Image: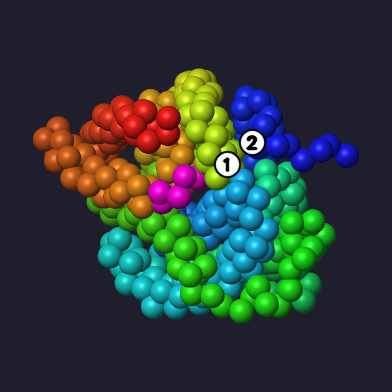
Amino acid sequence: MNPTPSLTKDPISSLIKKIAIPASVGTFFQTMFNIVDTFFAGKISPEALSALAKSFPIYFIIVAACVGVTVGGTSLVANSIGENNKENILGYFAHTIIYAVLVSILITIIGFVFSPILFALMGSVDEVIVFSLQYTNVIFAGSIIFIMLVALNSLLHADGDTKTYRNVLILSFFLNIVLNPLFIFGYGLIPAMGITGIGVATIVAQFIGLLIIFNKIIKSNRIKDISTKYFYPKVYLLRNLFYQSAPISAALLLISVGNFIILTYIGIFGEYATAGYGSAARFEQILLLPVLGLNTAIISIIGQNFGAKNFLRVKESYFKAVIYGFTLMIISGFIIFISADKIVSIFSDNPSVISFGSMYLKISALIFPAYPIFFISNGFFMAIKKSSYSMYLNIIRNVILFVPTIIVAMMFGGSFQSFFWSYCFFNWLYVICLFAFVGVYIKRNLN
């Protein structure tokens, strides 16, 4: 049995590999899970594929809540581990669960109330709106399962264990391959549910994952002394979780806003443009996995070292993660550029869908090396309990940046291509400024 790594003592390079690789593998299967959904939606119809694409920014409300809960719990528990404060470890773990329940109730209400309005604002035709709601209604009904799973997993991530969640995501992927056609097309006593079946398959797979994580957690030595008293709500613990998680949830909601803006803009070019972009965007997530793994790693590593006041290790973790990510994304961008046509044709044989998706991927490939700077900088600020900084960074990138993007795109004809070329330029301008800002922040505050 491998010993638990010491995040405050082991070499940074080896820690990044030990944590980031399992996290990346796990996220690979999570992304493949979504790609399976996209594949089967394409088997229903191009309209169903468009519906799934338009559902993403709304579904992302749950993703934002999940990340907020897990980052809030992970960073506060990790800092408590670094401080060797057992009471805070138990208190924050218990209150992460309480917080997850409260957040899931809020998210479910928001999803049911606002989804129909948002789909209509995207300019969807009636058939696409119906498909979209059939999917998202199921997802929002089961949001507590998503959020409770990551709340429990925050303890494992705080301790540097990304392997358990990786295994859950691998299992979920294979379950999804079986469950999707079962619920979409029906078999035996199970009726054909169409696109609703995609949502049902997701909920069933997530629930099985929740049971596995729960079984792992109850065996953890970190919470062997936990008792019911830690679950009595304490305002200051919930407040700290809120201040740590709400900014990153808000920041990720702004990613959803950004996706909403993109989908609304390209909706001008028709449902096939939306389907092409949506299928391409789902696939490009696969090649972004190393960045997401690095982000997970530095939240754990920097969180514990910041709590232990090992500021030199904090600095080393950030810059090494950026270098690794930048190098990997150059390779990923090259791969996606040369294979754009083949990628989109996996999901649809419609020539218009393939054309729009391919155009997007070839431009997006040039943005790839910029992503590590943005995501790892976000992870850095989350780990040092400055989640509000992450929120500001996301406001700039996912809201404000679209103003000059659209203005410049319109100056060059307002086409599908000109929009994404403008988006590429302003993303690079932004991350160059961001990298300089983080460097100055570290020099002034962590020496």
Q: Is residue 385 magenta?
A: yes
Is the magenta region chiefly helix, strand or loop?
Answer: loop
- What is the spatial separation of the Cα atoms under label 2 and label 1, in whole angstroms? 7 Å
Residue under label 2: 8
Residue 437: x %, y % from top left: 31, 32
Which of the marked residues, 2 or 1, is nearer the chain's N terminus?
A: 2
Here the colouring is rainbow
- In the rendering, at what x and y percent does residue 81 appear? 64, 50
Dot 2: element: loop
Compare residues 150 and 310 and report the one nearer the observer: 310
Q: Label 1: which residue?
A: 308
288 sits left or right of 429 in the view = right
Q: Is residue 212 visible?
A: no
Is residue 286 covered in magenta?
A: no
Disc 1: CA contacts within 10 A as few (<14), some (14-19) or many (>=20):
some
Q: Amino acid at mark 1?
A: Ala
